[in-house]
Amino acid sequence: MSTDHAPARPTRPIPTSESPHMTKDKTFALIVEAVREILPELADHDFAETDTLDALGANSMDRAEIVMTVLEEMDLDIPLVDTHGPQNLGELARHLSDTAAVKAG
């Protein structure tokens, strides 16, 4: 009886935190981290994807700084105006993760 095994079939890579593509969940976590950094009064806030930066008390300068911080963390070079469509944190996370995936090819 032989102990040789057939070679394993290649499988699709499973996304991990080391994956080159940023997932929506990881992007959401980066957004939350940036919000807490820029607005320290929200350190204990339980963030939801339906939260909006405006409702959380971020003024226009805060919002720009939060988004620029996340873009820098993601190494994503897009115009700030391209981030104005999403209506809440979940939509922003989806938009940024999708944009990163397209740019990564």
Image (cartoon, rainbow, N blue to C red):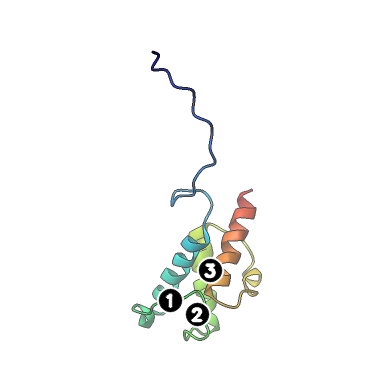
Considering only vertical position in the picture, is 77 above or below 92? Answer: above
CB atoms of marks 3 and 2 within 8 Å: no
- Disc 2 is placed on an element classified as loop
Find residue 81 and report its horizontal and vertical position in percent: 65, 72
Residue 68: mark: 3
At a point 41% along the width and 69% down the height, the residue shown is 33
Considering only vertical position in the picture, is 87 above or below 28? Answer: below
- Position of 35 compared to 10: left or right? left
- Disc 1 is placed on an element classified as loop
Q: Which residue is mark 2?
A: 51
Callout 2 environment at 10 Å: few (<14), some (14 to 19), or many (20+)?
Answer: some
Q: CA distance from mark 1 to mark 2?
A: 7 Å
- Disc 3 is placed on an element classified as helix
Q: Quadrant of the N terminus?
A: top left
At a point 44% along the width and 66% down the height, the residue shown is 29
In this rendered view, identify the residue nearer to me: 8 or 102: 8
Callout 1 environment at 10 Å: few (<14), some (14 to 19), or many (20+)?
Answer: some
CB atoms of marks 1 and 2 within 8 Å: yes
Callout 3 environment at 10 Å: few (<14), some (14 to 19), or many (20+)?
Answer: some
In this rendered view, identify the residue nearer to me: 6 or 98: 6
Q: Amino acid at mark 2?
A: Asp
Q: Nearer the viewer, mark 1 or mark 3?
A: 1
Q: Amino acid at mark 1?
A: Phe
Q: CA distance from mark 1 to mark 3?
A: 19 Å
At a point 41% along the width and 80% down the height, the residue shown is 39
Residue 47: mark: 1
